[in-house]
C-alpha cells in the first residue's frame, strides 16, 4: 500500500510541474529497470525527472545492474546532450 502511494505521489509531482520521468521513456530489460531489490521482491522506485521540453535531449536512461549505491539500491543514470 505504501509503495503504491509513493508511486502515485511521484507521478502527481511530475504532472503538477510538467516533468517527464526519464526512466519510462525507453524500453529496457528488467535488469536495467529495477532500482530496488530485496530478497524475492524488486521494484522501480528511483526516478530521474526532467523538464518536458528537454525530452529530445534525453538519449537514454537506465539502471547500472552491477553498481549498488547503498545495499539494495542500484544506480540510475541518464545520458543527455546539451542543446544550444
Image: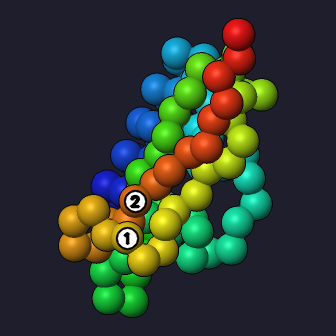
Dot 1, crowdedness within 10 Å: few (<14), some or many (≥20)? few
84 lies above or below 3: above
Which x, y percent locates residue 36? Answer: 38, 68
Q: Quadrant of the C terminus?
A: top right
Rendered residue at 76%/60% (across/down): 27
Instruction: Report whether 84 appears left or right of 45.
Output: right
In which quadrant is the N terminus drawn? bottom left
Of the pair 14 and 74, the residue shown nearer to us: 74
Please indicate whether residue 41 sits to the left or right of residue 80 in the image: left
Q: How many numbered discs?
A: 2
For marks 1 and 2, the one nearer the N-term is 1
Give the percent coordinates (x, y) of residue 66. 42, 77
The image quadrant that residue 30 belongs to is bottom right
- Residue nearer the viewer, 62 or 40: 62
Report the disc number at residue 4.
none
Residue that mark 1 sits on: 67
Residues under numbered marks 1 and 2 in contact, where contact means CB atoms less than 8 Å apart: yes
32 horizontally vs 57: left or right: left
Q: Quadrant of residue 80?
A: top right
Residue appearing at x 51%, y 62% in the figure: 63
Query: Height in image: 5 above or below 66?
Result: above
Q: Residue furthest left?
A: 70
Q: Label 2's element?
A: strand
Residue at 31% x, 69% y: name it: 68
Between 71 and 15, the one lying in front of the other is 71
The location of residue 31, given as percent across then percent down, is 57, 76
User: Element at badge 1?
Assistant: strand
Crowding at label 2, few (<14), some or many (≥20) Cα neighbours within 10 Å? Answer: some
Residue assigned mark 2: 75
- Looking at the image, residue 7 lies above or below residue 17: below
Tell me if residue 4 can be seen: no
- Residue at 68% in and 48% down: 60
Amino acid at each position: 500500500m505504501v509503495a503504491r502511494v509513493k508511486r502515485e505521489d511521484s507521478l502527481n509531482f511530475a504532472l503538477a510541474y510538467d516533468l517527464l520521468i526519464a526512466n519510462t521513456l525507453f524500453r529496457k530489460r528488467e535488469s536495467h529497470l529495477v532500482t530496488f531489490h530485496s530478497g524475492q521482491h524488486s521494484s522501480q522506485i528511483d526516478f530521474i525527472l526532467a523538464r518536458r521540453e528537454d525530452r529530445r535531449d534525453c538519449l537514454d536512461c537506465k539502471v547500472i545492474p552491477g553498481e549498488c549505491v547503498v545495499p539494495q539500491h542500484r544506480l540510475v543514470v541518464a545520458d543527455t546532450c546539451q542543446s544550444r
